[in-house]
Image (cartoon, rainbow, N blue to C red):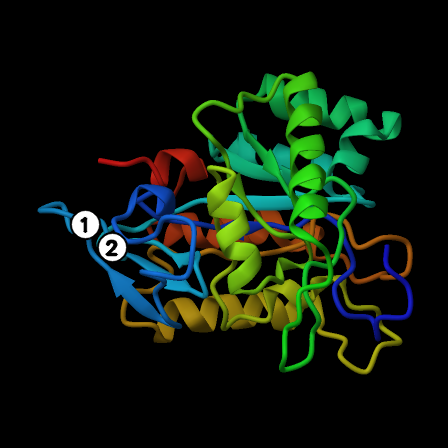
Amino acid sequence: MLRGMSNWKRPHFHVVLVACVAVLSSMPGLAAGSAGEIGPSEVREEGKAKASVELRDGAIVRGPTQARRLALMFTAHEFAEGGDTILDALAQHKAKAAFFLTGDFLRNTNFAPLIERLVREGHYLGPHSDKHLLLCSFDMSRRTLLTRPEFEADVRHNLRELHRVGAPTNPPPFFLPPYEHFNRETARWTRALGLTLINFTPGTRSVADYTLEKDRNFVSAQRILDNILRRERDDPHGLNGFLLLLHVGAGPGRADKMHRRFPELLEELTKRGYEFVRVDELLATP
């Protein structure tokens, strides 16, 4: 955990609902470098299948909205107290998810049983950085905070750890940046490594489930659940193509655990007709 950051984003587990059908690195004009980058909220469609994805600053943040499909994604660095609850709920709904894990998490022997279960039950494992380094500042400048060699070494170490635990790294995986925070420069570096950058769809406050009751920015599990379902109701496309990010573990400092409401969330979205699939299935090139 990075201390002294005004309780921004603690590196725990997250859940993301993702529905996308095109791989960013395969899109024309999105090779390494600034040329061809797509601005905020702009959508590009590919071929007759119209496999559209929404991109912001070079990252996929929402996939095609034609079908009621979404993918569950998690990230993990320090905490995982909700892991078994979430996996049990996924199994009950015959759903697969994507787990983006840091190298530190993968090396932590306390998490070995959970990692083995993730692999055994067929969930997607992807990189979330090795040491959960902050890539750029949170101010308006979004100044890059590490060198390109440092970034590349960190990601490669993460990929080696994923390979060690049995996660396939071919085709090149999707990358969910630490703190879900990046800039266009680090997006270009990600593409140069052959990875596809993804991030969450904004608008639900789901990423705030790490906040502590004592924090000024605390958001309760009930409010998060209400926001997700309100967005599903009010968005013209519902949650189609949505990337919804939740922490699986918020650590000992938070009593109001969102993972306890996760089975309820899955049950309600299932009633509303949504299908949950792996991120690599949804982002596969047609």
Q: Position of residue 68 (x, y in %)?
A: 30, 51
Please, which residue is most extreme toward the left here? 48
Residue 46's disc is 1
* Image quadrant in which you'd find residue 99: top right
User: Regarding mark 1 in the picture, which secondary structure is present there?
Assistant: loop
Q: Nearer the viewer, residue 268 or 49?
A: 49
Q: Amino acid at mark 2?
A: Ser
Q: Nearer the viewer, residue 15 or 284?
A: 284
Q: Residue at x 78, y 68 (%)?
A: 211
Q: Residue at x 70, y 57 (%)?
A: 258
Q: Amino acid at mark 1?
A: Glu
Q: Position of residue 9 (x, y in %)?
A: 74, 64
Q: Residue at x 83, y 68 (%)?
A: 212
Crowd rating for badge 1 (residues with CA inside 10 Å; few <14, some 14–19, many 20+): some
C-alpha distance separating marks 1 and 2: 6 Å
Circle 1/circle 2 CB separation < 8 Å: yes
* 166 shown above or below 44: above
Q: Position of residue 182 (x, y in %)?
A: 60, 62
Inspect this view and state whether residue 263 appears.
Answer: yes
Q: Which quarter of the figure is the C terminus placed in? A: top left
* Image quadrant in which you'd find residue 4: bottom right
